Structure formats: C-alpha cells, structure tokens
Amino acid sequence: MAKYVLGLKGLLCVAAVAALMVTATGCPKKTEPTPGKGGEKVTVSAPSNTDIKRSGTVDVKVSIKREKFSDPVAIKFEDLPTGVTVETKDMTIAKDVDSGTFQLKASDTAELVTKEVTVSASGPGGVAHSDKFKLTVKEK
C-alpha cells in the first residue's frame, strides 16, 4: 500500500476544493447573527422545507432565540416565488415569545417552482439574522 503524505499546501488545496464543491452544489451557507452594541443577539431558524398548492395557504413556523434582550422581533420573508405572498398582518414575534406562525398564500397562477426563501429576524439596536428554506409551489 502506498502512503500519502500531504503537507500544509496539500491540505490547503484539499480544503479549497471542498469549499468550492460546497459552494457549487448550492449547500446553504450559515450566516452569523449581527449583534447589538451590548452583545444582544437574535438567531432565527427557518421552517422545514415547505410545499404550497396553487390557490392554497400554508402556515409556517419561525423560531427565534434571543440573547440579552426580550423585545419583539420583526420577521420578513424574501425571495418568495412569483404569486406567493405573506398573508399575516403582524410580522413580529412578541416580547418573551420564541416562535411565531406566519401564513403564506399562493395565487391560482403562482409560479410552479422550488425556490430558496430567506426568512430574516431583526430586533432593537440592529440585531439581525437570516436563514433559508425551500418552498415548493405545486398544482392544485
């Protein structure tokens, strides 16, 4: 059996190739929360990958974790497929609560697609974080 010995340059090359493969295959990148001035943080967890039918609605649960604050947190959905809207009027997770349920609605002509959606959370003092999930729009 042959022995393979990688020096530091070899290890760096392997790591670089692995990083390129992860980026090229579309594996989601985890983002770090943006902290507040006093070390406050919010971390958001996107719902599981979700399906919605044309002309239908679906409830999605968004969870958050607060550190060093208890104020309400604003939630925002971005990059929704064409024809899908957020129906929930109050887009906040209340003080001292760790999750919220938000309703998405698909029109009868919504784009039939699987798309990565971003859910963001933001709070006082600039604390913010985002996560992604896949939303699939299907026929009725």
Image (tube, rainbow, N blue to C red):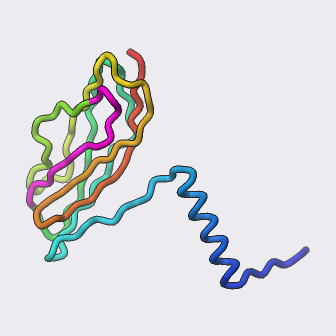
> In this rendering, would 98 be left or right of 29?
left
Residue under the image location 31 percent in, 52 percent down: 45
Residue under the image location 19 percent in, 48 percent down: 75
Quadrant in which the C terminus is drawn:
top left
Pick the front one: 119 or 68: 119
Q: Residue furthest bottom?
A: 7
Q: Is residue 5 above or below residue 107?
A: below
Quadrant in which the N terminus is drawn:
bottom right
* Residue 74 among magenta residues: yes
Picture quadrant where residue 96 is located: bottom left
Q: Position of residue 49 (x, y in %)?
A: 40, 39
Picture quadrant where residue 53 is located: top left
Q: Residue furthest front?
A: 82
Q: Position of residue 84 (x, y in %)?
A: 29, 29
Residue under the image location 38 percent in, 25 percent down: 111
Q: Is residue 118 above or below residue 29?
A: above
Residue under the image location 10 percent in, 55 percent down: 72
Q: How many marks?
A: 0
Q: Is residue 106 above or below residue 27?
A: above
Q: Read off the magenta span.
A: 71-84
> In this rendering, would 13 be left or right of 101?
right
Q: Position of residue 112 (x, y in %)?
A: 42, 24
Q: Position of residue 128 (x, y in %)?
A: 22, 61
Pick the front one: 100 or 109: 109
